[in-house]
Image: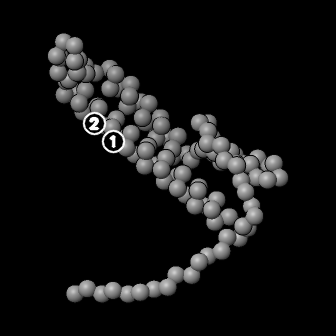
Amino acid sequence: MALQVEEKHELVKVARPDAAVGIDLGIKTLAVLAGRDGVLDAEPNPRYFDRAQNQLRRAGRAVSRRRGPDRRTGQQASRRWEKANQARNKIHHRVANLREDTLHKMTTRLACE
């Protein structure tokens, strides 16, 4: 059984259409926002993002201590390297998702304001 519904969406007007903001994405902070009046506002990195970065740093060190593949000599990677590399890739994926989610939430909030 299929059901199709047509719904009319009302356009939502922006609260302040004349407002403008300059955004500078950073490393130590997520972003620095500057309004027309010159007021600076720093958007800090979320705590969970910093914690994920630390996990990624630790996982990278664990991978570097294992015997990885060597193309020059044809040496195969050890099972421990593959397992550690898989864990690092999982954390990489999570960090990428966290970064994308945080930027999406920030840009949506700024567009609504």
| Image quadrant in which the C terminus is located | bottom right
Q: Please tell me how crowded label 1 is: few (under 14), some (14-19), or many (20+) other residues with Cα within 10 Å.
A: few
Amino acid type for the residue under numbered disc 1: Lys
CB contact under 8 Å: marks 1 and 2: yes
Colour style of the rendered protein structure: one colour
Q: Looking at the picture, does residue 78 appear above or below residue 104? A: above
Residue occupying the point 56% across, 47% down: 46
Count of marks placed on residues? 2
Q: Looking at the picture, does residue 57 appear above or below residue 18? A: above
Quarter of image, res 17: bottom right
Amino acid type for the residue under numbered disc 2: Gln
Does residue 69 appear left or right of residue 4 in this picture? left
Residue occupying the point 83% across, 52% down: 37
Residue in front for this viewpoint, 49 or 5: 5
Q: Please tell me how crowded label 2 is: few (under 14), some (14-19), or many (20+) other residues with Cα within 10 Å.
A: some
| Image quadrant in which the N terminus is located | bottom left
x, y percent for residue 23: 66, 47
Does residue 67 appear left or right of residue 15 in this picture? left
Q: Which mark is residue 90?
A: 1
Question: Real-space Cα distance between discs 1 and 2?
Answer: 6 Å
x, y percent for residue 80: 23, 27
* Label 2 SS: helix
- Residue occupied by mark 2: 86
* Label 1 SS: helix
x, y percent for residue 31: 64, 45
Residue occupying the point 38% across, 87% down: 5
Residue occupying the point 55% across, 45% down: 47
